[in-house]
Image (cartoon, rainbow, N blue to C red):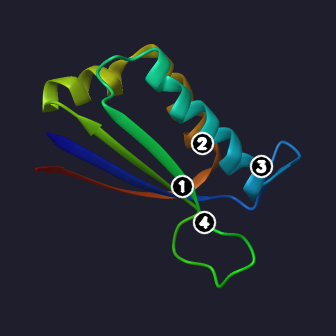
Amino acid sequence: MIKHIVFFKLVESADGKTNVELAERIKSELENLKNFIPEILKIEVGINIPNVPKTDYDIVLYSEFESFDALDIYQEHPLHKQVAAFIGKVKTSRAAVDYIV
């Protein structure tokens, strides 16, 4: 099994939306991919708790896949690319780790 974890730091605001509103949209759109991409075994998105000392990132994606081939299918899926394009517009940094269990 492959675990795919990604952290994003977001801009403070964009298109009239706050950092938290952007994070909520990203969470909703990423978690909704499970309904369209069967290779996703599990997906969970966490938003950093507001009004506590800031950590390095605003949002984290945790997902599981049967294989690297399944992860590749997910990453190349048009709906994932659509969400990734939005994230690309509102992120300032990204960190990712993929590992086998």
Describe residue 13's horizontal placement relative to residue 41 as left or right.
right
State the CA–CA distance, disc 1 to disc 4.
Answer: 7 Å
* Pick the front one: 31 or 91: 31
State the CA–CA distance, disc 3 to disc 4.
Answer: 12 Å
Q: Residue at x 68, y 58 (%)?
A: 11
Q: Amino acid at mark 4?
A: Asn
Characterize the local packing of mark 1: few (<14), some (14-19) or many (20 or more) Cα atoms within 10 angstroms: some
Q: Amino acid at mark 1?
A: Gly
Mark closer to the chain start, 1 or 2: 2
Kind of element beneath mark 3 = helix
Describe residue 10's horizontal placement relative to residue 96 as left or right.
right
Q: Which residue position holds label 2? A: 27
Label drawn at residue 48: 4
- Asked whether the residues under the numbered discs 1 and 2 touch, taking CB atoms below 8 Å apart as contact, a structural biologist would say yes
Kind of element beneath mark 2 = helix
Q: Is residue 77 above or below residue 26?
A: above
State the CA–CA distance, disc 3 to disc 1.
Answer: 13 Å
Q: Which residue position holds label 1? A: 46
* Residue 54 image position (x, y, % from top left): 62, 79
* Residue 88 image position (x, y, % from top left): 55, 41
* Pick the front one: 57 or 24: 24
Describe residue 60's horizontal placement relative to residue 70 as left or right.
right
* Residue 94 image position (x, y, % from top left): 44, 56
Q: Which residue position holds label 3? A: 21
- Asked whether the residues under the numbered discs 3 and 4 touch, taking CB atoms below 8 Å apart as contact, a structural biologist would say no
- Asked whether the residues under the numbered discs 1 and 4 touch, taking CB atoms below 8 Å apart as contact, a structural biologist would say yes
Total labels: the figure holds 4
Characterize the local packing of mark 4: few (<14), some (14-19) or many (20 or more) Cα atoms within 10 angstroms: some
Kind of element beneath mark 1 = strand
Q: Residue at x 34, y 21 (%)?
A: 76
Q: Classify the position of the N terminus by image quarter.
A: top left
Q: Amino acid at mark 2?
A: Lys
